[in-house]
Image (cartoon, grey):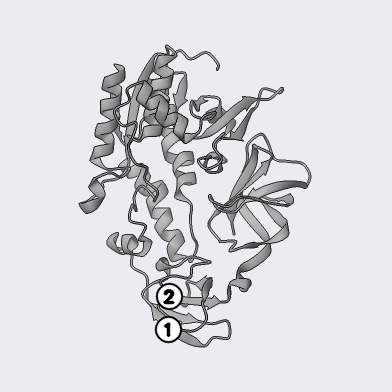
Amino acid sequence: MSYVKRGLVAMSGGVDSSVAAALLHEAGHDLIGVTLHLWDADGEQQVGRCCAPEDRDDARRTCEHLGIPHYVLDEREAFRQHVVDPFIAEYQAGRTPIPCVSCNRTVKLTYLAEVARRFDATHIATGHYARLERAANGHLRLLRGRDDDKDQSYFLFGLPQSTLHTLLFPLGDLVKSEVREAGRRLGVPNADKPESQELCFVPDGRIGDFINRQGSPTASGAIVDRDGTVLGRHQGVTNFTRGQRRGLGLGGGATRYVLRIVPDTADVIVGEESQLYGQRLFATDAHWVAGRPADAFHGEVRIRYRHRGALGNVTPKGDGFEVRFDEPQRAITPGQAAVVYRADEVIGGGFIA
């Protein structure tokens, strides 16, 4: 670990960021805790979910336990502008966005870098399950976390070297059970807090309902097969994503899957699962962690967070890249991130077009 004059710890109120702070405190580092107020939860969302008042309270209690200062900073306007509004627009355009990538790149870590300078902090620590390693040329290599089930390197491909050089990932070499064990040993108040599995601002997972509540409803339309035969009706394209089979409301018959969404006509095209497979993608808005590769190369590409990754030829093109997979992949979905790896190292990533 490089010299840490003072560390700013991003405190979400969850167990991971709390244990990250506790481990750094145990190591003797001068710390401050910062919680970003990003979204106002309402109704049932107020309890036990990220962005809820309870989470800010848990972050405060952890900082009190460690004897370090804690600040809550209001970033609701930036979160709405850079994360929530684009998220809604993408769904209305028939795409399936990955807001955690944008949040890390445009709101959380970018803003915290500014805050760190105000507090004369040299580093920012988070609870991400990822690792950093310095290369011979001085660049930092972004690596998967040791815990394969919790690895979050997928969400971090868009960070520039200037940001990576300020980051600390105290949990990168730990698995989740070890994190909870460390939390209990260090007396972290929320060491056994359950995890939130959904988007922090849509904790019930009902995307279409959320978008309607935000005053951005989409028109109803038809569910059709590839020949154009109308099979049913739906209440808005924001209720669907490629590969989905539940919630189509088509009754009996063969199981059908969403193949494509046509926002201009509000049609949802469905078909057989075999029709979901493809062997090629093009990604735009690419970011290369240690610089754009000069030539095509063979790498592993993850096309969604829970995707295990698949081998293919990656060819940088313009502001993006093309991937030709060795084997067909299921439900290559526009809007999701395609993240490229060599072994454990993140080479770069972009957004599926």
Q: Which corner quadrant of the image does residue 185 belong to?
A: top left
Residue 152 locus on image (x, y percent): 52, 40
Please say if the residues under marks 2 and 1 sit with CB atoms less than 8 Å apart.
Answer: yes
Q: Nearer the viewer, residue 177 or 52?
A: 177
- Quarter of the image for the C terminus: give it: bottom right
Q: State the separation of the CA atoms marked 2 and 1.
A: 8 Å
Q: Badge 1, how many Cα within 10 Å: few under 14, some, many 20+?
A: some
Q: Is residue 117 above or below residue 142?
A: above
Q: Which corner quadrant of the image does residue 48 belong to?
A: top left
Taking the spot 41% from the left edge, 66% from the top edge, the residue there is: 238
Residue 191 locus on image (x, y percent): 34, 31
Taking the spot 40% from the left edge, 58% from the top edge, the residue there is: 88
Give residue 280's mark: none
Give residue 248's mark: 2
Taking the spot 66% from the left edge, 65% from the top edge, the residue there is: 278
Q: Is residue 192 above or below residue 281?
A: above
Q: Is residue 285 above or below residue 253?
A: above
Which residue position holds label 1?
232
User: Which residue is at the far left?
Assistant: 43
Asked if residue 318 lies left or right of residue 247, the reply is right
Residue 104 locus on image (x, y percent): 46, 40
Q: Which corner quadrant of the image does residue 61 belong to?
A: top left
Q: Upstream in the sequence, badge 2 or badge 1?
A: 1
The secondary element bearing badge 1 is classed as strand
- Residue 109 appears in the rendering: yes
The secondary element bearing badge 2 is classed as loop
Q: Nearer the viewer, residue 263 or 238?
A: 238
Taking the spot 30% from the left edge, 25% from the top edge, the residue there is: 62
Q: Badge 2, how many Cα within 10 Å: few under 14, some, many 20+?
A: many
Residue 129 locus on image (x, y percent): 50, 35
Residue type for callout 2: Leu
Residue type for callout 1: Gly
